[in-house]
Amino acid sequence: MGDYPSKRTRSVNELTDQIFEGALKAEPLKDEIYCQIIKQLTDNHVKYSEEKGWELLWLCTGLFPPSNVLLPHIQRFLQSKKHHPLSGDCMQRLHKALRNGSRKYPPHLVEVEAIQHKTTQIFHKVYFPDDTDEAFEVESSTKAKDFCQNISTRLLLKSSEGFSLFVKISDKVISVPEGDFFFDFVRHLTDWIKKSRPAKDGIIPSLTYQVFFMKKLWTSTVPGKDSFADSIFHYYQELPKYLRGYHKCSREEVFHLAALIYRVKFEDDKSHFSSIPKMLRELVPQDLIRQMSTDDWKRSVIAYFNKHPGKSREEAKLMFLKIIYKWATFGSAFFEVKQTTEPNYPEILLIAINKHGVSLIDPKTKDILTTHPFTKISNWSSGNTYFHITIGNLVRGSKLLCETSLGYKMDDLLTSYISQMLTNMNKQRSGRGNRSLGSRCLSPARGRRHPGHVASPSQGNTETHNYAHTHSYLRAIKRPINLTAMFLGCEQKLEYPCLCRAE
């Protein structure tokens, strides 16, 4: 608070970490922090010191509430200081902390910088698959689920179901668990990056990051059901997977889809026909381009383009989605892995995780070798170089051992789909007036980490999921594991640099 100035240069949130870390770990210290701050604000005639005290109180009310014994005293203090600009905001933050619970980590750098610049509103830029972005207000009490709902409402989506926030940090893309406070999650990741990548020659690794909002679970996705979701998300998320050659499709479908992609790019403008040979990688799956000459591709694409005159860009997107929706691999997340256990399968496999389960695909023929529904998956684990999965009985079931650096993504997606499946099953049975799924349901083993835990994707520790018959599955499986982000201060239009670098 400036009472004992130090000549040593400190990072922005070094002191706030020292103040709040202990209280977040030990409940009794929370009241102590409140008491010390209020004491510093009482009869403090040093203007600079008093303002720093209010900044600390603003941060504190966004982190955790005081005990029920101390609460009325804190409220009376704030009411007695109505003349101060931060008093009302502190009261609102206090009520939200009472409603949403305590944070797990000290204030994020952005929160500290915001209040130091006398800004109580923080706007975070969020990026979408169609290369657009918008800024959304994020409060200290904002959880990922609320953030997703706010975005869905702003974009006029019919539902936020299946959507998720993703943080691109360093070389990882990690889904934000819906129950996590947004700033807690980002703080957790930045702390992990700092620990896993120590400074070299005094140079601290770049900690810039991006936040994306995308469709994650495609269980209830039907093209045409939500035009805004189709236009902003579904088309632009499915297009790259199609062009990488992950789907099996006929030549006629390829001609038709190429014409639709061209129409999305240029609508009815035919002046770019001459450039089709140069843009084949943007129109045709990469593994099929050499099957025909560039002139043959051009003639075929133009022929199919002329079959649908007058179609708008949005109509072309929907037609594209309706074609690939017929494929069993629609809405999949694809992972190229090296498997070491099944001699009847190729060594290099393409694994697709979607609403049907986990599919094993021959990367050369694109044939689906087998699909394991979620109900048959009994165990899976992941580490920084592998992903293992057990199908069937835990004792006699078959195991698939895969080498991949994306095990954390596969783990996260599989956990999320199974969590959604079990939740929906329980809702359906409850809706029919039946008893809950009880002991017939699958549930994680006792060794599973806490539902709110997010594994650091490249750490040596593993995430293991072991499903057995027990009635407590819903309590244990609630959480899914797993351009520049900018923060704009409303009052002064401050732009905060991002904290973690993207992939």
Image (tube, rainbow, N blue to C red):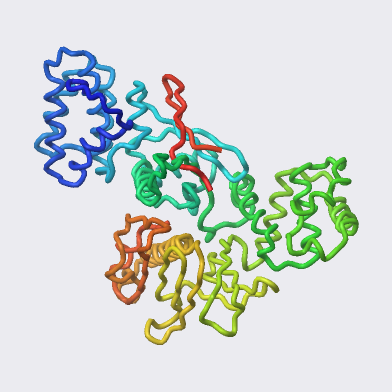
Nearer the observer, 320 or 138: 138
Q: Is residue 259 above or below residue 10?
A: below
Taking the spot 52% from the left edge, 78% from the top edge, the residue there is: 340
For the image shown, how many numbered marks are present on the structure?
0
Taking the spot 51% from the left edge, 81% from the top edge, the residue there is: 341
Taking the spot 34% from the left edge, 37% from the top edge, the residue there is: 108
Task: Name the outermost residue toward the front.
Answer: 201
Q: Quadrant of residue 310?
A: top right
Residue 415 in percent (x, y) is at: 42, 64
Q: Is residue 479 left or right of residue 45?
A: right
Q: Is residue 290 left or right of residue 184?
A: right
Residue 281 in percent (x, y) is at: 75, 54
Residue 448 in percent (x, y) is at: 31, 66
Nearer the observer, 272 or 475: 272
Residue 174 in percent (x, y) is at: 46, 52
| Quadrant containing the N terminus in the rendered view | top left
Q: Is residue 146 above or below residue 216?
A: above
Q: Is residue 340 above or below residue 119?
A: below
Q: Is residue 111 left or right of residue 273?
A: left
Task: Name the outermost residue toward the left.
Answer: 69
Task: Name the outermost residue toward the bottom.
Answer: 396
